[in-house]
Amino acid sequence: MKVQGVVLDDASRRVDPDQVRLDGEPLEFPHGLLVMLHKPVGLVCSHDTKEGPRVYDLLPERWQERDPKVTTIGRLDKETSGILLFTDQGSLVQRLTSPKHHVDKVYEATLDREVTAVMIEAFERGLELNEGGERLQTLPAVLRSLGGKRAEVTLREGKYHQVRRMFAAVGAHVETLARTRFGEWTLGDLPEGEWKELPLPAH
Ligand code: URA
């Protein structure tokens, strides 16, 4: 490892990450990584290879060696597609997933029935879900009809299976689910199965 052409043999020295060269190459994401993936259905958001095909298998293999580890920012179910973010910055995970930071996540669902005014009001009031025997109150969420059996839901939190469970609580079944927006980010024309780097937001 070299810094400004000089071999560094003192591990305690503080250096500018932009100046570091490893085997002659600059470091990849020296200030941290933020990546958006267009997740297809059928992949799990787990590091464990025993759980089946993983979203991490769509990223460069060398990133699995990074320290700090690259993880998803929140999770999508195996059967959910859409925008999924990855980072190695723990503070960013906290900032983008904690409801107190008011980061909207938008989902499009196809249901087994049409959206009704009663459902819209129930989402707006917040629903009571059963969480392992405990009662969990959801924060107010915005539900709107996209026509026919299609619906859009905007949430500020991300409990396990939350969208599917909220619809189940009002008597509807989710047939397909895709996340279309995460905070300020949308997929744009990113093809399914592909990823792209994003600039790290300013602190
Ligand atoms: N809500 C769900 O039910 N599933 C997801 O993958 C994301 C939100």
Image: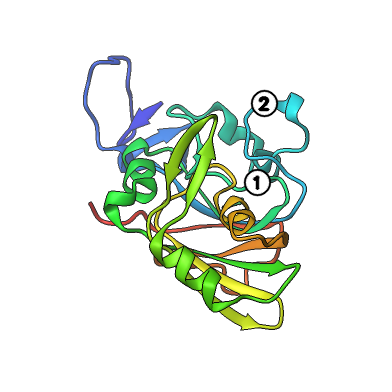
Which residue is located at x 27 percent, y 50 percent? 100
Q: Position of residue 155 (x, y in %)?
A: 44, 60
- The color scheme shown is rainbow
Q: Position of residue 201 (x, y in %)?
A: 32, 56
Identify residue type, mark 1: Asp
Label 1 neighbour load within 10 Å: few <14, some 14-19, many 20+: some
Which residue is located at x 59 percent, y 46 percent? 161
In the drawing, what numbered circle is on residue 2?
none
Label 2 neighbour load within 10 Å: few <14, some 14-19, many 20+: few
Which residue is located at x 63 percent, y 39 percent? 45
Q: Which residue is mark 2?
A: 48
Identify residue type, mark 2: Asp
Q: Is mark 2 within 8 Å of ligand 1?
A: no
Q: Is mark 1 within 8 Å of ligand 1?
A: yes
Q: Position of residue 175 (x, y in %)?
A: 75, 61
Which secondary structure, mark 2? loop
Using the image as rendered, state which of residue 157 and residue 18 is in the foreground: 157
Q: Nearer the viewer, mark 1 or mark 2?
A: 1
In the drawing, what numbered circle is on residue 77?
1
Which secondary structure, mark 1? loop
Using the rendered view, name the quadrant where residue 26 is placed.
Answer: top left
Using the image as rendered, state which of residue 170 and residue 51 is in the foreground: 170
Which mark sits nearer the N-terminus, 1 or 2?
Answer: 2
Which residue is located at x 50 percent, y 30 percent? 66
Q: Quadrant of the N terminus?
A: top left
Left or right side of 33 for 54: right
